Image: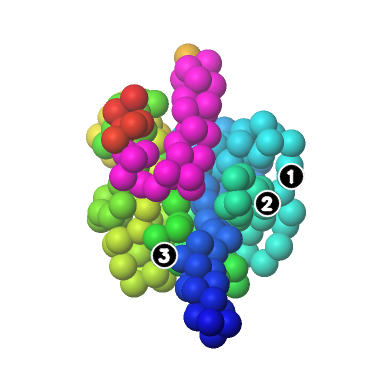
Amino acid sequence: MLKWLTTLFKSKEKIDPMKKFLIVGLGNIGEKYANTRHNIGFKILDSYITKKDISFETQKLGDIAYYKIKGRTLVLLKPNTFMNLSGKAIKYWMTKEKISLENILVITDDLNLPFGSLRLKTKGSDGGHNGLKDTQDKLQTTKYNRLRFGISADYSKGRQVDYVLGNWSEQETLDIKNRLEMCHKIIESFVLSGPSITMNTYNGK
């Protein structure tokens, strides 16, 4: 009887462990990049930790913050490797914190979506995005969760780099505040309810 109860308890432990999630905002370090379109991942995490009254601490390969919600632990990461080596930091913290691939969420800008559009996906190509390209390379898979924030493609031919590394317009700066709150909800829904429910609830809103 005792052996059966022990087996049952261990089985329950495996099914219902303390869950841990790696939430990554992509961007470039340095003041000159702080308000650029390419840094929306940083901006979303900065606004999230401000709301939760926690702070980042600079550690190996990035700035890290921890937050707990309903039995889940969020490890929030802003890589300090610059965009093109984002995957290096993601892989390191994924391994260090023993976080499974399905519990990773990478937040990034997307030229292919209208400004402010939000789309959660569980897999996909890098779409020419260097941060996603390195993430795919380091994780050796395209099957990882990413939250794409639309920055539109409102630039003339040959000006893509200037556009993504350019600052938000005054109107975009005003409009983006409302979208940040929606991003917070998506992060927490992803952690608490999973990607499928979150996609059905928030994609396209």
Element assignment for label 1: loop
Whether the residues at callouts 2 and 1 have beta carbons within 8 Å, the answer is yes
User: Few, some or many C-alpha atoms within 10 Å of disc 2 (few <14, some 14-19, many ≥20)?
Assistant: some
Residue 112: give x, y in percent of width and height.
27, 37
CA distance separating discs 1 and 3: 25 Å
* Amino acid at dot 1: Ser
Compared to residue 57, the image places residue 179 above or below, namely above
Q: Quadrant of residue 142?
A: bottom left
> Does the magenta run of residues contain 190?
yes
Whether the residues at callouts 2 and 3 have beta carbons within 8 Å, the answer is no
Report the span colored magenta.
172-199
Q: Residue at x 49, y 33 (%)?
A: 185
Compared to residue 127, the image places residue 186 above or below, namely above
Residue 162 visible? The answer is: no
Label annotation for residue 196: none
* Amino acid at dot 3: Leu
Label 1, on which residue?
Answer: 55
Give the left or right position of residue 102, taking residue 203 as reference: right
Q: What secondary structure is the magenta-colored segment mainly?
A: helix
Element assignment for label 3: helix
- Mark with earlier residue (2, 3): 2
CA distance separating discs 2 and 3: 19 Å
Compared to residue 177, the image places residue 48 above or below, namely below
Quadrant the C terminus occupies: top left
Label annotation for residue 101: 3
Q: Residue at x 61, y 36 (%)?
A: 48
Residue 161: give x, y in percent of width and height.
39, 42
Q: Residue furthest bottom?
A: 3
Label 2, on which residue?
Answer: 65
User: Few, some or many C-alpha atoms within 10 Å of disc 1 (few <14, some 14-19, many ≥20)?
Assistant: some
User: Few, some or many C-alpha atoms within 10 Å of disc 3 (few <14, some 14-19, many ≥20)?
Assistant: some
